[in-house]
Image (cartoon, grey):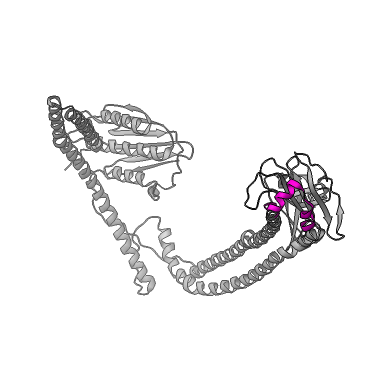
Amino acid sequence: MKYRLRNKVPGRTAFTNPPHFSYEAPMSTSPSKQHSLSLQKKLLITLVIVALGFILAQLLVINFFVYPSYVALERNKGKTDIERCLNALGREIHYLDKFTHDWSSWDDSYEFIVDGNKDYIDSNLQTSTFVDNEIHLIFYVGARGSVVWGKAVDLESEGTVQIKDFPEKTWPLYHHLLASDDRIISGLFMSDCGPMLVASRPILHTDHTGPSHGRLIMGRLLNEDYIKVLQEQTQVKWTMTPMDQVSSELTSAEIELLQGSEKLKFRVQSDALIVYTIYNDLREKPALLLRAEISREISQQGLKTVSYAFMGSILGVFSIFTLLMVFLNRIIVRPVSILTRNVVTIRDSENLALLGRNESRDEIGVLHSEINHLIEKLFFYQQRLRGLSSQLLVSEETERRRFASELHDRIGQTLTIAKMRLDALGTTATSATDREEAVELSGLLGQLIQEARTLTFELSPPMLYEIGLCAALEWLVDVYKEQHELTVHLQCCEVPKDDNSTLAVMAFQIVRELLMNVVKHARTDEVDIEIVIRDDELLITVSDQGIGMAVDRSAELIGSSKKAFGLFSIRERLSNFGGSLVIDSKPGKGTTITFAIPFYDIELD
């Protein structure tokens, strides 16, 4: 898409008045009603869309945020309940371990594990000890695995039971409840009679000294009665099932996930939320599947709440919708219908010109007169701003050149003399420290001199005035290659020099701005610049293969966005001096910008 902006009037622009034209009001039967009706329809459609959008947004919020928050609360409750169950088991193991510790760290127990005296058995190891403390198993095992005393009791019948995992005479040394050191062992043990909470501690003196000659093992079966007690403590309806007895309620894949990364598994039913987790035994192997059942009261109550809120909001939307229609019709539709005639007149005029006289003294007449005043002011200030812009450009370049000259002739020379004198002082210094400091300061002065030279070139390149445009652009190409890694392919013809180099200065400034645009926006590392002279004009083309841009249909719109303001500024400068600008760009196809400057003699005041 190509748009050419051209102004063939060089130099300063004379301030003139905008053109006039006369008009008659459109001969429409009832334009006011026609446009009011259209506006009413648009307002109606807009309000309907807004109302439907609000309802849809509310549905989305309810569906994706509000109701899921209730479900999340319900899941958090399920997580909390299952954690209470786990904590209850951990607490029971802790109490059992503490009870075992009280018995194992006792001088009488220490003597008993050594001599096995009968008095200790008669005093402490009667059936009542098991029943009173709800202990199903007590074993005293020597250091080599021999059983000094041991028994497992059914608390209901108070009779002795045999458990294969706890031999009556000798335990293998690799038994999970035995240890060669004084390690404390406690946790869940899966026995042939069912899951059992166990604790194993070394038998020591009351003051916890040794050496230990054996271990005391106590156990408590997790039977149905015990589970009921824990359910009452936790106020949670939960059960446990050994892993080898898990039914088809969970798939093998779900069980594997519970054993791996997932610690909890939720299953939603119509009236309950089921939470699953796995409890490991003292070997950290999966032993029990815990199942907690939580009522879905939270989500059900949340569903009722959001339903009532949604119905109430719909009623509110329709009430507000009706009030807005009445209100907008009075404050917007009617006033806009009065302004429609003037808008249609300006639209049909095909150019921005003063409207004809209107003798009416009502609001339309006042508006008509004010529009004319605005057009006059806009035209006047547009002409004036263009003139000021051209003067500012000339003044700016003059000041740049003067400041660069002052920087080079005064500050640069002074710094050079200071460096030479400092170098001389350094060579004559007797102290090594003074010589080193002189060398360091000389290096800093040299760096400062180089930065001053660079700043001088950036303000106003001397070769632009001394050699010409092509030499200045070659220097600019090297700068962008070094600072921005931008490769510029320059084809430059010899440009005639004038006394004030106005054309070269303007061309150099515009090329520098276009290169900076390439660095900032084009996303490419190569640019082509071609400079030719054609028909008394300097024609410069800057092209790249970057991401391109969308060019507005109307050339007057260049500069309407922040990104295009630089192009707008370039266009205005060219227009003030009779130049032109052509932009050829599409998204993804690169950008080619061509501008022309006529050979007019413009003084730098």
Across and down, in percent, residue 417 comes to 13, 31
Q: Is residue 184 left or right of residue 557?
A: right
Q: Is residue 575 left or right of residue 40?
A: left
Can you say which quadrant of the picture contains the C terminus? Answer: top left
Tell me if residue 110 is in the magenta stretch: yes
* 87 in relation to 473, above or below: below
In this view, the residue in front, 95 or 412, is 95
Which is more toward the observer, 10 or 250? 250
Residue situated furthest top in the rendering: 427
Residue 217, position as x, y percentages in the image? 74, 49
Of residues 479 and 196, which is closer to you in this image? Answer: 196
Taking the image as shown, residue 313 lies to the left or right of residue 110, namely: left
Relative to 130, residue 497 above or below: above
The magenta region covers 103-125
Asked whether the viewer can see residue 377, the reply is yes
Residue 316 occupies quadrant: bottom right
User: Which part of the image, by quadrant, shows the N terminus?
Assistant: top left
Give the dominant element type of the magenta stretch: helix, strand or loop.
helix
Residue 587 colored in magenta in the image: no
User: On screen, 371 above or below 595?
Assistant: below
Determine which quarter of the picture holds residue 142.
Answer: top right
Residue at point 70%, 42% (across, down)? 179
| Left or right: 459 in relation to 548 | left
User: Which x, y percent locates residue 601?
Assistant: 20, 38
Residue 220 visible, this angle:
no
* Residue nearest the observer in this picture, 491 or 16: 491
Q: Position of residue 244 (x, y in %)?
A: 81, 46
Count of numbered marks: 0
